[in-house]
Image (spheres, rainbow, N blue to C red):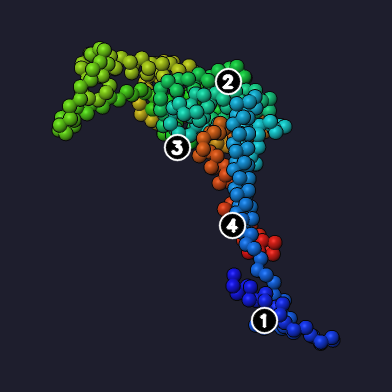
Amino acid sequence: MPQDNNWQQQVWQQPAAPQGAPAPQPQGFPPYYQPEPPKKSRGWIVALVAVLCVFGVIALGMWSCTSAVSSSFGTLGALGSTAATSDVDYLTSDAVGVIDIDGTIQYDGTTCSPEGLKAQLDVAAENKHIKAVVLRVNSGGGTATAGEEMAAYVREFSEDSGKPVVVSSASMNASAAYEISSQADYIYTAKTTAIGAIGTALQVTDLSGLLDKLGISIENVTSSDSKDSSYGTRPLTEEERAYYQNMVNQINETFIQTVAEGRDMTVEEVRALATGLTFTGMEAVENGLADEIGTREDAVAKAAELAGSSTAKTVMLDNPSSSLSELLNLMSESRLSADDLTQALKELENDGSLAR
């Protein structure tokens, strides 16, 4: 810059001081100030550090997510303990595995699905330290077929592994969720839990009246007269209505039989309770759909008792998702927060080695 050149010329043209006399100061600068050429900006270093930190956080999140997914499908699986998050392979003493069934019963890969539940039951079956399983259920039901499969997995686990299964009911344990629960060795419920709802429903919506009012005409070209019966563009015929009713009755009968086998009740006893409505926890204990009023801790203690173990230690059995949202959640839970990163960069900028 022009000013810098003038300054350099001014400095080097100062007359030499006589021997023994103090050196003259350049004009325009205070005494004893030794001017230096301005340092080049090293802001790129700050940017590089920021990029490296971000990639470090991403790598940590990806490693955590990959490790969790790998262990989930391994022989031991992924889980955490009530004291601190850890893998099941770190267990060195007896424990009760806890599986949360919280949400709609469906095919979504979580423990609310056949695949997700079986994966964690397999973990519990293969690990010698897990002596029993508690299903913490908070669900209003869902897909009938998913509930049927999950109920079979619970029954097979208890029979094949010899490890007891105890259910702890939260606010709701209904329909397909109760079908699953009925296969456990013992069912706890809260007094105010909505439990039961043994029944089956199939919904067909008829939008033809609304379509007519809107002036919308839909023509379905089908291979048979009833192929479009569930499309909602026309009313059901009497034959179709009877067909669907028979289908519902068949599915519901399997529901009733499953509950009867699991609860050691007669089919007639269960059918009398299959009103499609839920009972309170207190009513469920009286009519045989549940065994006792109790908490999650009571269920854990009962599971240990049935397993012949005195431990109250629990281990969460979960099947983590490998989706991008899960990765972002892992990153957001990292101890290195955005504020921490910003503060660290500010400290580096204030350091003489990163002067601009």
Left or right, residue 117 beside residue 174: right
Residue depicted at 36% across the width and 23% down the height = 199
- Residue marked by disc 4: 342
Closer to the eye: label 3 or 4? 4
The spot of residue 5 in percent (x, y) is 63, 73
Q: Does residue 272 sit above or below 326 in this rendering?
A: above
Of pointers 2 and 3, the one earlier in the residue sequence:
2
The spot of residue 282 in percent (x, y) is 44, 33
Residue 112 or residue 336, whichever sits in front: 336
Q: Does residue 208 sit above or below 7 in this rendering?
A: above
| Residue type indicated by callout 1 | Phe
| Residue type indicated by callout 4 | Thr
- Residue marked by disc 3: 171
Left or right, residue 82 beside residue 137: right
Marks 1 and 4, how far apart at CA: 36 Å
Residue depicted at 63% across the width and 34% down the height = 67
Of pointers 3 and 1, the one earlier in the residue sequence:
1
Marks 3 and 4, how far apart at CA: 43 Å
Label 3: how many residues lie within 10 Å, few (<14), some (14-19) or many (20+)? some
- Residue marked by disc 2: 158
| Residue type indicated by callout 2 | Ser
